[in-house]
Amino acid sequence: MTVTLADVAARAGVSSATVSRVLNGNYPVAGSTRARVLRAVEELEYVVNGQARGLAAATSDLVGVLVNDIADPFFGIMAGAAQAEIAHGSRGGTGTCGGKLAVVCNTGGCPEAELTYLTLLQRQRAAGVIVTGGAAEGTEHTQAVTAKLARLASDGTRVVLCGRPPLPLDGDAATLAFDNRGGARRLTGHLLELGHRHIGYITGPENRSTTRHRLEGHRAALADHGLAADAERLTVGGDFGRAAGYRGARELLDAEPELTAIVAANDTAALGVCAALRERGLRVPQDVSVAGFDDLPFSVDAAPALTTVRLPLHEAGARAGRLVMGRESAPPGGVSVVTARLVTRASTAPPPAS
Amino acid sequence: MTVTLADVAARAGVSSATVSRVLNGNYPVAGSTRARVLRAVEELEYVVNGQARGLAAATSDLVGVLVNDIADPFFGIMAGAAQAEIAHGSRGGTGTCGGKLAVVCNTGGCPEAELTYLTLLQRQRAAGVIVTGGAAEGTEHTQAVTAKLARLASDGTRVVLCGRPPLPLDGDAATLAFDNRGGARRLTGHLLELGHRHIGYITGPENRSTTRHRLEGHRAALADHGLAADAERLTVGGDFGRAAGYRGARELLDAEPELTAIVAANDTAALGVCAALRERGLRVPQDVSVAGFDDLPFSVDAAPALTTVRLPLHEAGARAGRLVMGRESAPPGGVSVVTARLVTRASTAPPPAS
DNA sequence: CCACACATAGCAAGCGCTTACTGCGCGCCG
DNA sequence: CGGCGCGCAGTAAGCGCTTGCTATGTGTGG
């Protein structure tokens, strides 16, 4: 039923070695022979068996891409860009084609799931792995994940960390670190400059590096203006979700009547904040200013358009893809910082005069 | 460097066959032997070689998921849900684990890319393939894609079409067809019932089944009310993108001063429509009603909240995942229709009295 | 007490491909 | 005109694992 190299060889009247060489093209084969082989391939609709090839050549066509939530455009954008680079060079048809297959794995940000996927990828002897999104911190699995990554790296799998703090890895590893702290600091700084003095903050999920860094940036800005005191009280927990923003905003509003601005740890939550505000009859930005983080595509379309911090997700994903494919080399030290740029739009304005 | 079955066998003082059987667990092995083997596996941090296993057992741990645009939540939601089902049963650690690896492939809706990925998947002897999103129609590659799918199906790969018209496939194939036409018809029907008579329509990309079905539904509703005449004139082309909605709305407004409602082929475009309207000083829904399609998560947060048609994307994706894993069986005939429910929110209202 | 059945473990033959290494025939130089 | 080297093609040894079949040891019934 299934056509093998040997079938093609028989049909073309050559040995299977010759067919293999024609298909891989790194060995001289006479033009006439090659043509005969290719015709046989065509006629038989032969498709190489990737597993057998991988086994024999000790290579793999797979590259893993771990994301926290594939339904979230934040990750979708990075994953899409990375995949485009990874698949790059592919050509259709029955013939040979370069490029690899990206395996996008949804971890839900759970270190155990990360570990599972990493093991699965290791089983397939993946050529590389891109890990996106913040790292969970402080759980025992975190360490296991690090160990696994170290293992992969030292086994020759290219490891790229994208939007996650650098890790000391042996082999061919690189890190694209997002400047979450700096971005958050500039964002809150912007609000402070506008004159806000009572600024609420809705965090991301607990124990994640991204959450921590953004919060640290926010607090650093407050400290710059000698406002560190209130910080704790005006911070409520969230999870990057829209509902958390909604809930958090209500909570903040109840706790602090003088509140004039709310910063959410990301755009999605900021949208929830806006909804809660609207519901209370508060206008954005006249009564309360709102800011997010990430600058996802929908943020510009929110009403009012959201002030946020832009992370070049597409570019970072593409770069991660190139790094994992070895098409671009890592900077010395292996770590390069991705800058986060403040984008001011209509959702922030000076606080009401009152 | 890399640990093999034989290494484990040597360490445990058994043959490699025994180790294999312990790991696969479908053959009686004495308890004491099993324990010894497992300890050796642990000590050596052995991880099976998926390629070798696949080759020997003629199986695969891979399942492909083709999507048009991974950065679009429409696909992200389905892919995420499907993947959760596909990975289901996985357990961490070094030991055995069930579940498979989902390979999410971004095709950009381009049939050539679909073909390429399908071939890549075929090379890896994927256990199954889920194809999501509408099909391109009328290009010569469309036929090639169909042929490739037929080939895969008859080779034993489970094929699941999710949100794409059914195809006559041999093997173990199933289709989850979205009721785009019915949904669109109900949506436009809603607008007509509100009293609108001049309704603009912004389509999806050309030559895609989804675009065609939604437009057909829209026109069917118009025809129901004897309004088929204007349909052509009040339809402008789009591509499911936000910018297309923006552009389309301006175009429609210029062409038809009496316009009181605009239907976009999806929510993303509807957001662009709202932006254009705001820019012209038109209020939604007092001056112009707007409706989308899909009910993506952000639609409820738009201002005003978008009237749209809800497609149970999560559920459909999960179901596709179960089908491709053989954990749920296809309905007789292989096709099951996913219903599209009208969701009326604040963006639609009766036309202005004038 | 022997034959036979059953429970385990080992042997070895692949799975389909890559890739040294070997073999062959030809043209060219001396 | 002989030998050498080169350009191609073939041979075969794996890659790491699964699995049908065989071998061994123990317990049981006749």
Image (cartoon, coloured by chain):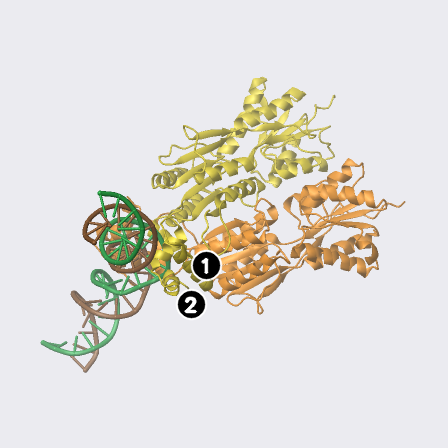
Chain colours: A yellow, B orange, C green, D brown
Q: What residue did someone put label 1 on? A: B127
Q: Nearer the viewer, residue A49 or B159?
A: A49
Q: Residue at x 55, y 43 (%)?
A: A76
Mark 2, Cα crowd under 10 Å, few <14 / some 14-19 / many 20+, is: few
Mark 1, Cα crowd under 10 Å, few <14 / some 14-19 / many 20+, is: many
Image quadrant in which the N terminus of chain A is located: bottom left
Q: Is residue B298 left or right of residue A93?
A: right
Image quadrant in which the C terminus of chain A is located: top right
Quarter of the image where one finds residue A172: top left
Quarter of the image where one finds residue B98: bottom left
Q: Is residue B208 left or right of residue D28?
A: right
| Label 1 residue SS | loop
The chain holding disc 2 is A
Q: What residue did someone put label 2 on? A: A1
Q: Nearer the viewer, residue A239 or B211?
A: B211
| Label 2 residue SS | loop
- Measured as percent of width and height from the top left, residue B176 is found at 59, 60
- Measured as percent of width and height from the top left, residue A45 is found at 46, 62
The chain holding disc 1 is B
- Measured as percent of width and height from the top left, residue B140 is found at 60, 58
Q: Residue at x 72, y 38 (%)?
A: A279
* Dot 2 amino acid type: Met
Q: Is residue B69 left or right of residue A168?
A: right
Q: Nearer the viewer, residue A67 or A281?
A: A67
Q: Residue at x 68, y 50 (%)?
A: B204
Give the spatial CA distance, label 1 vs label 2: 17 Å
* Dot 1 amino acid type: Ala
* Mark number, residue B326: none
One can see residue A211 in this view: yes
